[in-house]
Structure formats: C-alpha cells, structure tokens
Image (spheres, rainbow, N blue to C red):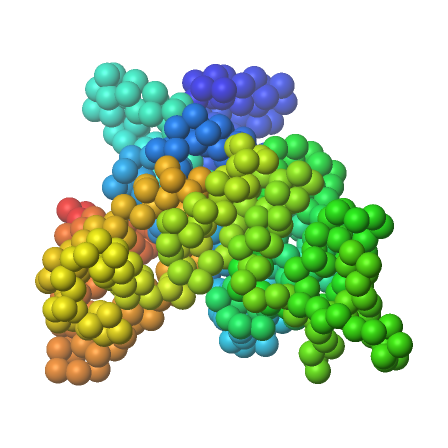
C-alpha cells in the first residue's frame, strides 16, 4: 500500500466512529504504520527468508552475486552496521547479519564470559535476535521520521515537486531489516530441544539457522581442539527438527545451514547404527581407526565391527570416545555435506583451519558431483592469522614456481619488515579478492566474519583509553571520536536523535498537538551538530 493509500485507509477507519475518533490524524496513523511495518518476528522471518532465497537463486545464476555479513553481539552494533551500509552503498542488498554463538557465550551470558562450548543459556540466542530486530526497526522509524519532516518542510514551503519526490521515496523505502543467519550451535540437546529452541529463534525473526554436527555436551569452538562429531542419523534428526520448526510456524522458505566440523574433528562419541553394508551408518563407521583382533581375545565392553569378514575393534580412548583414522577429515566433510543436502539442508558450512581457496574447492568439487547446486556459507574467521596464512601461501607458490625466495623467512612472514615488500603486497591483494575469488571457484554463496565487532570494540576502546587517560586527555576523545564522527557523517554524533528522541517528539505532537512538550527545542545541545 502506498503512503497516500494508507492515509486514505486510515481516514476511512477514523470516519467509521462517527466523530469520536476525530482527534486522530489519518496521516499520522499512516506514518506510524510505515514505521511499524514488521508487527512480529514471524513477519520478519518470512520476509527475510524470501530475500535470502532470491539471493541464492541470483548466486546460482552468477557467482558474482555472493552475499556478506558481519557478526554482531548487540542490537546497537547491528543497527549501526546497517545504517553505515545504507549510507555508503545506498542499499542493503546482499548484506546480512550473523549471530555468533561464540559471541553470545563470551558477551551475553548471565554466567559471565564463557568459552564457545554451549554452556550459555539457550534463551539468550532468541533474546539477542529479538534485540537486534528491535534496533533495526528503530533505525527504520528514525529514518522515516526524518523523511516525514522533509516532506512537511516541502509542503510548508509550497514545493510540490519536492513533496512528490519525498512521497515516492517513502513509498519505495528500503528497510534496515535484513536476514540473520543465527547460530544454534549443536542444538543444545536432543532433537526435541533443538526443535524448541529453533521455534523461539524463528519467532524472534531468524530466517536462517546454522547447526553443526558436533555432540551437544562435548561441543567446542570450531577452531579449537577436542571436537567430537555425531553419526549422520543424529544430525539429520536435528535438521528435520529445524525444518519442522520453520514449517510449523508458516515460514516455508526458511533456510538451514548444515555445518560440518569433521575436518578438524578426530573423535566420535558413538558408533553409528548400520543395517546393511554401504549404508550411511556403515560409511560413517568406515572412517574409524580400528585394529584387527582374534574374537577369542575380545574384552568385556568391546565394540566389534565386521569388515569383510575381519573382526575389527575401534580404538577407544580413556575418555570413552572413539577416534577416526588420521587424514580422513576431508572425506568425512564431503560425505557430511552430501548427506545434509540430501536430507533437507539448504546451505553448507565447512569449518576449516585456514582460508585456502583450493582446499575448500577440492571438497566442493566432489560435493557438486552429487549435488550440482551445492553452495556454502564460509567463516572468514578472526581465528585465522590472515596476514601470515596468505604470505605463506604466496611464498609456497613462488617456491614451487622456482622463484628466488631467499629474501624471506617463511616462519617470520608476519613481521612488519615484509609489509612493503612484493610478497606482502601480493598477499594483501589475495586477501582483498578472497571473497570474490572463492565465490567463483569454491561455491561460497555467503561470506561472514563471526567475531569482527568483538575485536573492533576492543581495538577502539584501547585507543580511547590510551589517549583519554594519557597526555591527550579530553582531546583524545574529541579528536579521534567526536571530530571523526562529524567529518565522516556518523549518525551517532547526534546521539539523542539516534536514541529515538525525535521520534518521541513526533508522537508527543500526535497525542497532544500544540500542548506537546518536546525535547528537540532551541535549547537541545544536539542543535550544535545541525551542520554535521
């Protein structure tokens, strides 16, 4: 419905009440409706799921249309990210948000800072989703409110052309509300627990859930040691639980991102159930590290597998876990991905130990032999030393090509002495084009950074503390924060406006008319930033 049509509709509603609602202004109603277009989290989930599905189709047609996101641990951080994107690029298309379980554990748990081991309260995940969308909807309300003020000013000045332009801009307004890919970890329990949490996350607005194939009670961060995977049937049950949650809530386009940690996980807690040779359970068990035994020497509690008539005992660790054969990680990843896509997943996530395009592509090529349109979300993780990894990749490539690399020490390539070298420049260029190149070569539809705002918050706070508590004192804040905000056009320099003060003034005027006591008067110090 257009802005004008919404005004007319509100006017009809008011008139039906025979004058008792005459104190209600139809255009004010239309403005409030436009500022509250998403009534529930399910409205958001349905809308953003369609956006993401359309983006996936666009990527299938042309891998240049990959998408990106940054991880956010607070609604304000998410809001400022989207405001910045609209300011710099004019559109939010292809830009999402990522909700990281790592950051929830580290920053949002009532227990205090925790490692990424699913020990935080599961309810903190949907709570953060709801918080993020509350801030994004507030960004809409603020921006639309400013557009309404420009419209009113154009009318007051008799500028009909400007007024029509503003009405058209309001009709075609692009929201800050974008898809969230939300981390449900390993499901926080059995499949029923996964289903219940998935429902809460979807009701809060999540259109995409990322779930991993680790065991819930042994879950580890993807870039730490000691990871333990589950048999495929266990993981498939949780994928189905997520799909039932989407369908049961009427979000038919919901997206499931199936993550495999098998590349770095050498352990399993369970032997898979196998009913016949070659089935999925048998394939999972085939990777176990086993030793042939004489049945007569079997011990109480042993698990015995029959492999081509040979009695094999999987190696069991003191932790009661079973280990996989070394070097099987990539093969297990490929199998995990194919099975996940064949059983309801929409996107893949392969957790790797380094950002290496050919490593990823070597697995994706094999997956696409079975599922041709397979595509990934990939973690451009801060756990990787990007500078060192890419400098070593360039070094190794040059060495293989026969170039003289005697000027470089491979183990010390992180040193700043290499920053201005040819090798350093080549590595930086490969980092710059990594997302574009891997989208084309390695099937990566979505590039995300899990923890960027965790690190930026620490870095900027360190800078401010060093300056403010040092010789620069107040100049440290003014020069590097406020002056930079003004000159870079950061909306938050007008922090009263950002917090919703002007929207509140609009509401006061709707409710009380000329009697409204507004905050945005002549004595509001935010007027000092009118030219910012």
Q: How many dots with numbers? A: 0
Q: Residue at x 59, y 76 (%)?
A: 111
Does the rendering let one see residue 443?
Answer: yes
Quadrant housing residue 476: bottom left
How far across and how far down the image is residue 197, in percent? 69, 54
294 displayed left or right of 494? right
Residue in the foreground of this view, choosing between 286 and 23: 286
Q: Is residue 195 above or below residue 265?
A: above
Residue at image point 63% right, 71% down: 119
The image shows residue 157 at horizontal and vertical percentages of 21, 24
Of residue 311 and residue 194, the one placed in the foreground of this image is 311
Which residue does the image show at 24% across and 21% down from the upper left?
Answer: 162
Question: Could you tell me residue 332's position as x and y percent?
Answer: 60, 54
Q: Residue at x 66, y 38 (%)?
A: 342
- In the visual, does 211 lie left or right of 315? left
Q: Nearer the viewer, residue 339 or 522?
A: 339
């Amino acid at each position: 419905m257009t802005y004008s049509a919404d005004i007319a509709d509100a006017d009809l509603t008011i008139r039906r009440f025979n004058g008792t609602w005459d104190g209600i202004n139809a255009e004010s109603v239309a403005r409030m409706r436009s500022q509250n277009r998403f009534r529930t989290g399910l409205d958001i989930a349905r809308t953003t799921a369609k956006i993401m599905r359309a983006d996936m189709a666009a990527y299938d047609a042309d891998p240049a249309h990959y998408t990106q996101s940054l991880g956010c641990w607070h609604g304000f951080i998410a809001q400022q990210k989207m405001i910045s994107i609209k300011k710099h690029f004019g559109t939010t298309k292809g830009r999402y948000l990522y909700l990281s379980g790592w950051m929830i554990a580290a920053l949002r748990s009532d227990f205090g800072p925790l490692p990424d081991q699913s020990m935080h309260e599961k309810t903190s995940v949907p709570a953060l989703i709801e918080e993020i969308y509350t801030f994004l909807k507030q960004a809409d309300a603020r921006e639309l409110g400013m557009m309404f003020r420009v419209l009113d000013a154009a009318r007051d000045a008799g500028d009909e052309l400007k007024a029509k332009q503003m009405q058209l801009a309001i009709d075609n307004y692009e929201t800050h509300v974008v898809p969230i890919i939300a981390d449900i970890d390993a499901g926080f329990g059995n499949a029923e627990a996964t289903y219940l949490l998935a429902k809460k996350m979807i009701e809060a607005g999540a259109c995409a859930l990322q779930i991993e194939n680790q065991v819930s009670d042994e879950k580890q961060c993807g870039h730490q040691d000691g990871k333990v995977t589950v048999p495929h049937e266990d993981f498939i049950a949780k994928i189905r639980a997520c799909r039932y949650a989407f369908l049961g809530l009427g979000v038919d386009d919901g997206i499931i991102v199936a993550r495999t940690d098998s590349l770095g996980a050498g352990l399993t807690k369970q032997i898979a159930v196998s009913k016949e040779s070659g089935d999925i359970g048998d394939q999972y068990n085939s990777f176990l590290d086993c030793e042939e035994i004489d049945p007569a020497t079997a011990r109480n509690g042993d698990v015995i597998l029959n492999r081509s008539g040979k009695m094999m005992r999987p190696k069991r660790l003191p932790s009661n876990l079973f280990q996989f054969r070394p070097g099987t990680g990539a093969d297990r990843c490929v199998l995990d991905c194919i099975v996940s896509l064949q059983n309801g997943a929409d996107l893949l996530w392969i957790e790797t130990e380094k950002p290496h395009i050919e490593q990823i592509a070597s697995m994706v090529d094999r997956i696409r032999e079975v599922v041709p349109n397979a595509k990934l979300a990939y973690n451009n993780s801060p756990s990787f030393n990007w500078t060192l990894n890419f400098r070593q990749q360039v070094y190794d490539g040059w060495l293989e090509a026969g170039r003289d690399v005697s000027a470089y020490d491979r183990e010390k390539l992180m040193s700043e002495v290499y920053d201005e070298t040819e090798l350093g420049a080549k590595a930086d260029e490969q980092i710059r084009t990594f997302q574009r190149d891997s989208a084309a070569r390695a099937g990566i539809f979505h590039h995300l950074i899990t923890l960027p705002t965790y690190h930026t918050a620490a870095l900027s706070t360190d800078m401010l503390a060093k300056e403010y508590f040092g010789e620069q004192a107040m100049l440290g804040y003014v020069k590097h924060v406020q002056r930079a905000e003004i000159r870079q056009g950061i909306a938050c320099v007008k922090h009263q406006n950002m917090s919703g003060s002007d929207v509140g003034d609009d509401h006061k005027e709707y409710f009380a008319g000329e009697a409204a006591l507004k905050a945005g008067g002549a004595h509001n110090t935010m007027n000092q930033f009118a030219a910012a």
